[in-house]
Every structure is written in structure tokens, then in C-alpha cells.
């Protein structure tokens, strides 16, 4: 599904260069549940951002199936993200001026889905994450755990091929965090590909494959199970 070949990412800090990623090569297959595990400053967030086409590599190659997206223009990168990826962030990234329902509908509007279908699908997704009663609320009325449930529903809006979750339980207490991890695991059990960035070894061990990163390099790659299945993807 995803292949990175000798990917590097360097930042010019004025007083020198920071090599955030150093010759990273990996393959993520459809149906996997992968944890990118590393401490702060290890390069895991940079790797996450490159996988999500939120940043571009300084060098190397990024293939989405057989489609080379290493240096796609920003507009094309946004189209690919909206079509193929769903994002779950630590800080939820919900739009405060939109209702819960409108937040979930938003990715579908960018994809050109008709209004009625957007609303119907958003209502179904919110019901699936247990929030059917709060569709008209603004995000600020929800608890942190409920807001993260909304972000999961939003991530699923365009039926993505891959969910990218960046420290998804970082701002949650243990009970809500456990429920969010269970949701991700349930999605993976149904065939959804999950890539989660985390600094927490216990959370990492819940994944089916752990990629450990340190100083911008993969230091260990521990597959724990076979992928759910393989199928094609057109970018």
C-alpha cells in the first residue's frame, strides 16, 4: 500500500541543519495496524507527517501503491489526502464554529458529496461512535473523549484506505484513551489500515506491528501478525 525508499527530511535552523529523518525505508501493507513508537524528538511526528502528505521529504521516494507522490503539487496532495486518508490528532482539530455534525460532514464537502448524502453518512458515523444525541452541539460542549470520537467519525467520512492517528490518546484520561484505542482496533479488525504515532510503549504493543524510531532512523521493526488482506488502490 505505502512504500518509502531512503526518505530523508532535513530542516534548516539558521544555525545549522537538523536531520529529522535519515534514510528511512519501510512498507505498510493494506490491513496492517502499525505503531510508530519513539520518544519526543525521535522523528516519529516527521515520519507521520510525510506519510500523511502533510510534509514533503527532502530526498527519497514515496509510493502510494504504484503511484509516485514524492513531489506532488500541494493541491494534488490535498486531493489524495482527502480521498485516501483519515486523520485523528491528539488535539482533535475540530472546527469550533461548526457543530459536531458539520465537522463530520466537512471532508465530504471537499470531496463533492451532495449535501443530503453528507448529512446521512455523518449521522450514521456519529451513531457508530456513540454520539447520535449530540449532533447539533458545538465541540466545546463535549468532553475530550467525546471530541476524539467525533474526530474518528470525521476520519471515516470519505471511507478512507488508511487512518493516521497521531498520539490519539495524548489529551485523554486512561478510560477514554482505552476506548479510543479499542475503536481503532475494531476498525482494524474490519480491515482498515491503521498507522498510529505514539511515545507510549504500552500503546505501541497493542498494535500488530511496531516500528521503533530513534534519532530519525528506524532501529527496530517488529511485525506481530499478517495483514488482514490486500487489494488495489488507485490514486
Image (tube, helix red, strand yellow):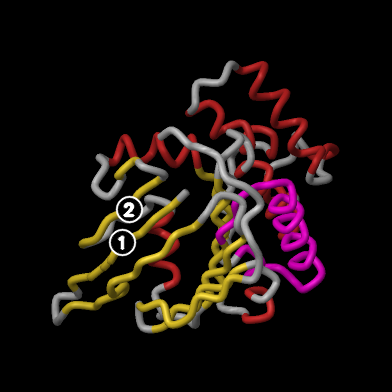
In the visual, does 112 lie left or right of 77?
right
Q: Earlier in the sequence, mark 2 or mark 1?
A: 1
* Corner quadrant of residue 138: top right
**Which residue is pictured at 77% across the width and 60% down the height?**
182
Q: Residues within 10 Å of mark 2 (few under 14, many from 20)?
A: many
What is the x, y in percent for residue 102? 64, 33
Report if residue 181 lies within the magenta region.
yes
**Mark 2 lies on residue:** 62
**Horizontal and vertical percent position of residue 2:** 43, 52
Does the magenta portion include 190?
yes
Q: Secondary structure at mark 1?
A: strand
**Left or right of 48 on screen, residue 207:** right
- Seen at 62% across and 60% down, the residue is 33
User: Which residues make up the magenta segment?
Assistant: 168-195
Nearer to me, 146 or 18: 18
Q: Residue at x 74, y 52 (%)?
A: 189
Pointer 1 residue: 5
**Residue at the outermost left position:** 15
Amino acid at each position: 500500500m505505502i512504500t518509502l525508499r531512503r526518505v530523508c527530511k532535513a530542516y534548516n535552523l539558521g544555525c545549522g541543519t537538523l536531520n529529522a529523518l535519515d534514510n528511512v525505508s519501510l512498507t505498510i501493507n493494506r490491513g496492517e495496524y502499525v505503531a510508530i513508537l519513539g520518544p519526543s524528538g525521535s522523528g516519529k511526528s516527521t515520519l507521520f507527517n510525510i506519510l500523511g502528505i502533510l510534509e514533503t521529504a527532502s530526498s527519497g521516494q514515496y509510493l502510494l501503491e504504484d503511484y509516485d507522490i514524492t513531489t506532488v503539487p500541494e493541491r494534488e496532495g490535498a486531493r489524495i489526502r482527502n480521498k485516501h486518508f483519515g486523520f485523528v490528532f491528539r488535539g482533535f482539530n475540530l472546527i469550533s464554529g461548526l457543530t459536531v455534525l458539520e465537522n463530520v460532514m466537512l471532508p465530504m464537502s471537499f470531496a463533492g458529496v451532495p449535501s443530503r448524502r453528507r448529512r446521512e453518512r455523518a449521522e450514521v458515523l456519529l451513531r457508530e461512535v456513540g454520539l447520535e444525541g449530540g449532533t447539533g452541539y458545538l465541540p466545546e460542549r463535549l468532553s475530550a473523549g467525546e471530541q476524539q470520537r467525533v474526530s474518528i467519525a470525521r476520519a471515516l467520512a470519505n471511507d478512507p484506505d488508511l487512518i493516521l492517528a497521531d498520539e490519539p490518546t495524548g489529551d485523554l484520561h486512561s478510560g477514554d484513551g482505552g476506548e479510543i484505542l479499542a475503536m481503532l482496533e475494531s476498525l482494524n479488525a474490519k480491515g482498515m489500515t491503521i498507522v498510529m504515532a505514539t511515545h507510549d510503549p504500552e500503546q505501541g504493543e497493542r498494535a500488530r506491528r511496531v516500528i521503533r524510531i530513534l534519532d530519525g532512523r528506524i532501529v527496530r521493526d517488529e511485525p506481530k501478525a499478517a495483514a488482514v488482506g490486500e487489494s488495489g488502490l488507485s490514486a
